[in-house]
Image (cartoon, grey):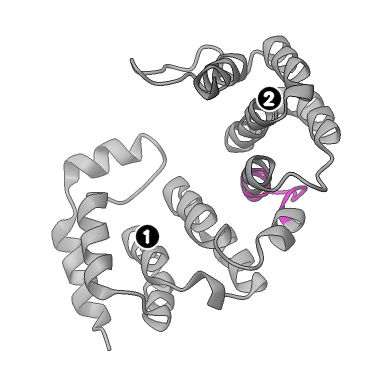
Amino acid sequence: MHDLSAVMGELDDLADPKILAVNQRHGDDHGVNLTKLRAVAKRLKADHGFAKQLWATGDSAARLLALLTCRPKEFTADELDQMLREARTPKVHDWLVGYVVMKGPHAEELRLRWLDDADPVVASAGWALTADRVKKRPDGLDLAGLLDTIEAEMKDAHERLQWQMNTTLAQIGIEHPALRERAVAIGERLGVLKDYPTPPNCTSPFAPIWIGEMVRRKG
């Protein structure tokens, strides 16, 4: 059995004020280099009970470690719902959705539960799961209906919700040629993320550019 206080002490020792300062600009509050955090997780190996102890501390670095060492299939849907509402910071939220919910058996149930949640950050998780499903398992989705909702709501949505709606828009355009022209037109008309600062050699998140680049790569 792992010693919680010892692991928490190790995370404290790994915290770097410079990393913390960078992360705080993005709304996060941990200062541990993620490569070093992954090394700790590799050493601890999967331990679901201990992961739940780490999560319960409320510490962001501990929660990220928990998400790397838990067993996604062992959570109930209600546990994951509560964890998402507790997640607080963007990195913990994103890892919870991407590393745990998407890999577990409750992804579709929670996608539907979260999609229209009154909390826009919770709703953004529903849209992240929707974007993933558009890409991997689109059968049964009302893609035209999703475009209707995006067209009506994305422009004025909360930043985190807007980002995931935009991701869904781009994935529809990339993966579904019959809807590509409409997806690009919606992106052009709304202009969401058009001026997003994009580093050299990276693809802009502006949907028309993103769609065009990914379609070009697919050849």
The residue most toward the left is 13
Q: Main secondary structure of the magenta part?
A: helix
Q: Which of 96 and 136 is in front in this view?
A: 136
Tell me the residue at 42%/70% (across/down).
55
Residue 32 in sight: no
Q: Residues within 10 Å of mark 2 (few under 14, many from 20)?
A: many
Which kind of residue does numbered mark 1 sit on? Answer: Leu
Tell me the residue at 27%/51% (across/down).
34
- Left/right placement of residue 118 relative to residue 63 reads right
- Left/right placement of residue 17 relative to residue 211 reads left
The mark closer to the camera, 2 or 1, is 2
Tell me the residue at 68%/16% (across/down).
187
Tags 2 and 1 touching, CB below 8 Å: no
Q: In which quarter of the image is residue 97?
A: bottom right
- Left/right placement of residue 64 relative to residue 204 reads left
- Percent of width and height locating residue 170: 63, 27
116 in relation to 21, above or below = below
Magenta span contains residue 125: yes
- Percent of width and height locating residue 98: 51, 52
81 in relation to 53, above or below = above
Q: Which of 195 and 57 is in front in this view?
A: 195
Magenta span contains residue 123: yes
Q: What stretch is highlighted in magenta?
A: 114-128
Residue 86 in sight: yes
Query: Circle 1 sits in a helix, a strand or a loop, which is it?
Result: helix
Question: N-terminal of the two: label 2 or label 1?
Answer: 1
Tell me the residue at 27%/89% (across/down).
1
- Percent of width and height locating residue 180: 72, 20
Residue 173's disc number: 2
Residue 64's disc number: 1
Q: Residues within 10 Å of mark 1 (few under 14, many from 20)?
A: many
Q: Which of 60 and 103 is in front in this view?
A: 103
